Amino acid sequence: MKTILRAGLIGALLATSTLAGCASTYYGAMEKIGYEKRDLLVQRVSDTARSQEAAKTEFANALEAFRAVVYVEPGALESSYDSLSKSYDRSVDKAEKVRSRIKDVKSVARDLFKEWNGELTEYSDPGLRQKAAEQLAETEARYDTLVAKMDAAAASMDPVLVMFHDRVLYLKHNLNARAIAALEPETAGLQSNVESLIADMERSIADADAFIAEMRPGV
C-alpha cells in the first residue's frame, strides 16, 4: 500500500512540476519524500528502457502487419490494411514516447552532474574530494556511453518509420492485388531494417540495465 501511495504521490508531483515548469520546486518536493537526483536519473533510465521495450515490440508487430497485407487473400485486403495502418500509428506513438523519455533522462542527468560538480568545492578533505571527483568522472563516462546508445537506437527508428509511412500511404490509395504484388520484393529490406532497429534497442536496454545496476550497487 505504501508503494502504491508513494507512486501516486510521485505521479502528482511530476504533473505539478510539468505544469509549473520549475525544476527546483520539483526536485525539492521529491527530496522531501526521499528521492535525490541520483534516484530520479535511475528511474528515468528505467522508464526509457521500458519505453524501448514497448517500441521494439510495436515495430515487430508492424512488420508482421505489413507481411499480412503483402501475403493476404484479396478478399481480406481492407481489414489487413486497417491493421497495418493502426500498427504504424502505434509505432509512431511508441517512438515519440522513447524520444520523450530520453529527453527526461538528459534533463535530470544535466542537473545531477551540475550539482555533483558544484559540491566538490564543499569538501575540506582533499582525499575525499579527489575520490568524489573520480566517481563523478566515472559516472559521467558511463552515462555518456548509455545516452549515446539511446540516441543511436532512437535515430534508427526514423528510417523504419519512413519506410512504413511510405508503404501505408501507398496502400491507402492502391489497395489492390497488383499494388500488393509490387510491394512484395521490399519485404526483405523492411525486415532487415526492423531487425537492425531491434538490435539497437536491445543494446541500449542492456546498457540501461547495466547503468542502473552500477548506480544501485547491492540492489
Image: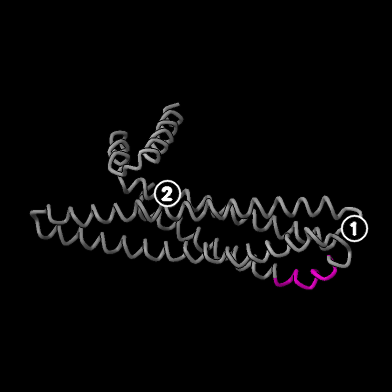
Three-letter code for the amino acid on which mark 1 is drawn? Glu
* Residue in the picture at 78% in, 61% down: 171
Q: Where does residue 189 sit, x and y in percent of width and height?
A: 70, 72
Three-letter code for the amino acid on which mark 2 is drawn? Arg
Q: Where does residue 143 sit, x and y in percent of width and height?
A: 37, 61
Q: Which mark is residue 73?
A: 1
Mark 1–mark 2 CB contact (< 8 Å): no
- Which span of residues is magenta-colored? 180-189
* Residue in the picture at 73% in, 71% down: 188
- Circle count: 2
Q: Overall secondary structure of the magenta stretch?
A: helix
Residue 4 covered by magenta stretch: no
Quadrant position of residue 163:
bottom right
Q: Is residue 135 above or below residue 36?
A: below
| SS of the residue under disc 1 | loop
* Residue in the picture at 63% in, 62% down: 161
Q: Which mark is residue 44?
A: 2
Tell me: 44 left or right of 85: left
Q: Where does residue 217 sit, x and y in percent of width and height?
A: 35, 51
Answer with mark 1 or mark 2, whichever residue precedes in sequence: 2
Rendered-image quadrant of the N terminus: top left
